[in-house]
Amino acid sequence: MSEQRFATTLLIPGGLWLLLCFAVPLGLVLAASFGSTDDLGNTIYGWHPDNYRQAFDPLFVPVLLRSVGYALATVALCLLIGYPVAYYIARYGGRWKHMLIALVVLPFFVNYLVRTYAWVAMLADEGLVNGAITNLGIRDSGIKFLNTDFAVIGGLVYGYLAFMILPIYAAIDRMDQALVEAGKDLYGTPWNTFRHVTWPATFQGVLAGAVLVFLPAVGDFISAQLLGGPGTYMVGNLIQQQFLGADNWPFGAALTTLLMAFLSVWMVLYLRSAARASRETAL
Amino acid sequence: MLNEKIDRRDLLLAGAGLALAGCGVGNSGGGSKKETEKVVKAKVDGDLVYFNWSEYLDPALIKKFEKQYGVKVRQSNFDSMSSMMAKLRSGNRYDVIFPDQSFAPKLIAANQLLKIDKSKLKNYDNVWKFFHDPAYDPGAEHTVPYGLYATGVIWNEDKISGMKGSWADLFRTDAKGKIYMLDDFQECLGMANLRHGFDLSTVDPDEIEQSKQMLIDQKPLLRGYSTDDIQNMINGNAWIHHGWNGDVVNLRNQVKNPESYRFEKCKEGIPVGSDTMAIPANAEHPGTALLFIDFMLDPENASQNVAYFGYPMAVTGAEAAFAKIAKDDPAVAITVDDVKNGQQFANLTGKDKALWDRAWTEVKAA
């Protein structure tokens, strides 16, 4: 067997996996998005482009804008929190480096949904945190944490922070320390060295983190469902409602397809930027 | 060019269709009549896969059933009729489910519920006569009645007083941010219909439009939509909750100041209804399910359950348990006459169901 054929054989398990668990479900969603429903809410496959017409109803524009707004705020906060954490671990982690990275990943051992429920118990009006606030006499009445925009964004940041830290950590770790020393040798202040040396050298990591956080955050429904209120409805909630609340899988599938198309645009832009960056480093 | 595009899409569809056929998904669209007429013995044939609302059956009774029959009860919960339907639709198999009187007919029509041979139930004679032939299931062929319920308003008197016995109480500006509505398309649109003086289950597009608008206008006052009225009241997030009569009894059992939690039936009219126990046609352990249903019809068990969840059960011998609850608080009382004469959610189908679903989606998205 030639080396090439051997390599091709290695692709088979992964290829089958992608076919069964990605291509087939995607095909089902696409097929359902052109379907209609019977009285039980079962999908009848057919040709009903109406689902897409309905999805472009101006009614849903604020929902999409809200989702993008929450996701952008999430990316910004994750970057603000994540960059210093990644920087510290990569530069000063020393022999604790791997341990610290493991700690960043540790919360993922528990399901996102369960962790979000924990926030509900802690932040309820008469929950643990507000109980402590009133018992310690800090305030007479508790603070309304839950069912606000902030709670939803907080939940998203909490849920996706690791996706920001890991690629930035990798970028900083990979960066040649000598570059920073060179910056200092040229009388660069710490800020100027960061701005002109470290930041550009790790920017691709930041971009990767931003995309990894943005994409799932736009489509998230758990945070808005559990921590949000009546005014925090996101695209994910709209889709979830079609599947679980409104007995309308075809419309939900059409919304899903459009959301995926929308997110693909961002993915393609990112991939092109990453490709350009790697070409530039190669030169 | 256009033709070519459509051809390509059709090709894609055909491919997806093939994939579908290959996986055997999407075959839940109604079984055959024969499937529902399987002969089942009331004998343990495996662990019970149980699917119900949360906190809607005394957990002590589950333990008792497990011990008595040497089986495990594998429990899962739904939080609305729609989500129960979604789980069934996606092919999940359960042994006992609890559809209400507006969804049971859908399942029956689609041959999704097993016929229950009443001669296999030792305690069936305890079931109140009215429910031997209810409108939602003629001849009670596929269902056995469970709890009777009414929808109204639950509030915490420590936090807010001066309630008026009207749906307008769910629109109080002095409780802004402390009001919850049930996360259920029928309950919400039904409430708005009643407040407008429309029929509970109206399918007039103009009336639904007005009710939709009422719910949208109400949103700034709301803390959220949730069917978890018990926990929302207990954790203090809710002062006023669109909720069910029995849940206030259930929640009183869980707090130190039960007298603070009140329930009112609204003068514009209230939805009433009854839940049922049923066995899906594709149940893997229908024998154990029959035993479980029979177990719940036992007067002693039914009484214990009523005391726990706060709803009357249509079981002779369990009346005293509910009478005791209703004596303490007549507001939570509901009788078979209420169910007979009251307004019940209709089984919406086709265009009418789509009209309600669409309005509800618009309320949520607004």
Image (cartoon, coloured by chain):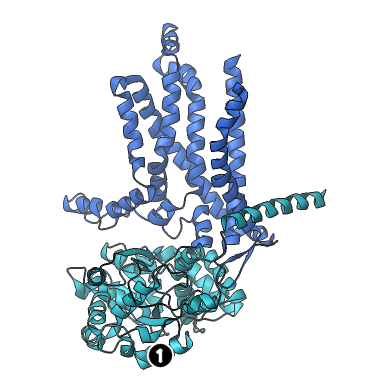
Chain colours: A blue, B cyan
**B267 or B326, nearer to the observer:** B326
The quadrant in which residue B70 appears is bottom left
Q: Does B37 sit above or below residue A239?
A: below
Q: Does A232 sit above or below residue B69?
A: above
Measured from the top left, where is residue B245 in percent x and y?
Answer: 32, 78
The quadrant in which residue B246 appears is bottom left
**B12 or B156, nearer to the observer:** B12
In what element is the residue under mark 1? helix
Measured from the top left, where is residue B280 in percent x and y?
Answer: 45, 72
- Residue that badge 1 annotates: B132
The three-letter code of the residue at mark 1 reads His
Q: Is residue A234 visible?
A: no
Measured from the top left, where is residue B101 in percent x and y?
Answer: 45, 80
Residue shown at 49%/84% (left/top)?
B197
Q: Does A145 sit above or below residue B335?
A: above
Please give left or right for residue A116 compared with residue B327 in the image.
Answer: right
Q: Does B232 sit above or below residue A66?
A: below
User: To which chain does the residue with label 1 belong?
Assistant: B
Q: Is residue B226 visible?
A: yes
Residue shown at 44%/34% (left/top)?
A164
Measured from the top left, where is residue B214 in percent x and y?
Answer: 50, 72
Residue shown at 55%/51% (left/top)?
A64
Residue shown at 32%/20% (left/top)?
A92
- Number of numbered tags placed on the structure image: 1
